[in-house]
Image (cartoon, coloured by chain):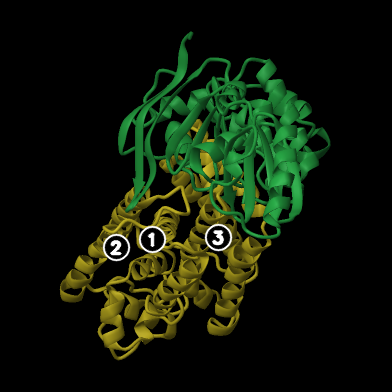
Chain colours: A green, B yellow
Amino acid sequence: MGNPILQVENLVKSYGDVQAVRGVSFSVEEGEVFGLLGPNGAGKTSIVEILEGLRDLDSGRVSVCGLDPQRDSQALKHEIGAALQSTSLPDKLRVMEALRLFSSFYKRRRNPEELLKRFGLEEKRNAFYSQLSGGQKQRLALAMALVNDPKVLFFDEPTAGLDPQVRREIYDIIEELKREKKTIVMTTHYIEEAERLCDRVAIVDHGKVVALGTPRELKSHSGGTTRIEVRLAKPEPDGSLKKLEGVADARELDGVYVIHSHRPPKTIVDLVKHLEAEGNELVSLEIASPSLEDVFIEMTGRRLRD
Amino acid sequence: MRNFATLTRMRIQLTLRNKMFLFFSVIMPFGFFFLYAGVFAKGQPAGVRFFLGPVVALTVMGSFWGLSAALVMFREQGILRRFHVTPVTPSDMLASSVVANYFLMFPTVLIEFLFARFVFHVTDFGDLLATFILISIGTVSFASLGLVVASVTNTMQETQVINQLLWLPLIFLSGATFPLAFLPHVVQNVSLFLPATYLVQGLQRAIFSSIPIWQLAVQVGSLAFWAILTFFLSAQLFRWEPEVKVRRNAKLLVLATIIPFLLLGFWENKYGNIPAQAQSALDSLSGPSKSAPPPDSQAQPDSPK
């Protein structure tokens, strides 16, 4: 591929006895939207914070825009923009003041007025930060990440805690940035978000990258199967569901039987017959089209969502 | 440098929008002023002039209260975290706190002087240059103390507890509330270990006894040295992130802030004459007393020169 703007090799980071990042490697091309998908506590935020130069790494090599985040953190900060998790602004700071203040820190700047307009915050220009809604705060956070027209953007869980409608607004904004060929590294634990926004996704679990590729590649890697989730009246012995027609894989996760099938209609018919013969009953049945969730289940034996 | 300037402006703006500031930095100092001027000095110009030093010192020392609280709040709420990802440095952040505090405190001090002049008819304010320098150095040093407190505490509650523990001895043992000469000898000996004493006594000597700056070298020098030391330490101990806990060696570094006044305290206890100077200032206010003639003020009661 072309020229990576960001490279990570064998990154390791521990906090005391806890190894948060255990040998992660990936690279991001210019103009790409790269996603780190994984459950909370997987180490995504640690990775991103090391890339931003906010935390020191224990071992491995990292380069962002040709700079070492640890050694050249000051120079790097002029090149990146970030919407971090769990940050905030002073309550009594006005929206426009925040944009002006933060843009004043950089050598290269974008017009704050234009950002205000673009992020739909014009009406709120004189509002105090404390008066903004959750969605407006997040829009401001994204606008602030752009004040220095950065080469690489980091969005750490950009939609966490927002309601679905606001989440879609944020998706629109990120899609627009994507059209402008901005390089974005984002973390998320929402499958929908990763599939919709990311060119490539690294699935992260327990501090490791367990799979990496475009969403399409990842899904086809999982065999292009359809996920069928069933609840049963009585527990089913291990392995018996694997023998059903068209089944690639079947496992029990928290009382739900998750079956991956190449031929869903055949599998369902066979399942019903099997249950009848065993004197078991179907309580519920759901069919989900292939998603990154399946890749995650396959790689980790767990679900991404709780 | 530019970051420092814009941050300073932001801090001033934010503080002026904060109602707590109005109470701690404006209403409380003026409360002290009128209590001292009206009750202790009974409205007499000489008395008001005598108490002006302690009142100004209280205003100046109050800096560390608001500053530590603001910084800890900024860290707890993740505001510092947001600045961390920008090119802003810890020194930008800390220096802007100190300078913003200076600009916010100065009008209060100025109004205290104007009250003294126009309400209580004090005409002579002693050595203005020495007063100005002491106020400036005092503000920076106590603001830096606030920054150190902010750096070694993890939560707002901890900060408030430490602030209380520092504040009470600073105001009661330094002569800021009760004139040093009123305090028992043992307490006077203890007071010589406190930076506040040097600020209070320095200001009182500059304003009341018209002592010029070069004769206040001990006060100015010790406070200036301490200001630099505490500021440097606060930059070393600075933490952007709430989850990053205080470093283990931090407590030791904090002990370093005590050393200058520990040494000076021993020296002053052995060779110094600060309590004697405080006594003579008090004597010249209340009339000649049976004690030895005042060493540096031959002035008449009620009109010290």
**Figure disc tally:** 3
Report how far apart the C-alphas of labels 3 and 2 lie in the structure. Answer: 34 Å
Give SS at disc 3. helix
Q: Secondary structure at mark 1?
A: helix
Residue B38 quadrant: bottom right
Q: Residue at x 72, y 28 (%)?
A: A173
Which residue is rendered at x = 46% and y = 66% of the image? B57
Considering every residue shown, the one lying at the far top of the view is A2
Nearer the camera: disc 3 or disc 2 = 2
**Mark 3, other Cα within 10 Å: few <14 / some 14–19 / many ≥20:** many
- Pick the residue in front: B87 or B114: B87
Residues at marks 1 and 2 touching, judged by CB atoms closer than 8 Å: yes
Give the residue type at disc 2.
Lys
Q: Residue at x 43, y 82 (%)?
A: B178
User: Image height check: is B149 above or below A33?
Assistant: below
Q: Is residue B203 left or right of residue A126?
A: left
Label drawn at residue B109: 3
State left or right for residue A284 relative to residue B14: right
Q: Which residue is mark 2?
A: B251
Residue placed most toward the observer, A11 or A131: A11
Residue A110 visible within the image: yes
Residue B51 x/y as whole percent: 49, 74
Dot 2: chain letter: B
For label 1, the residue is B152
Q: Amino acid at mark 1?
A: Val
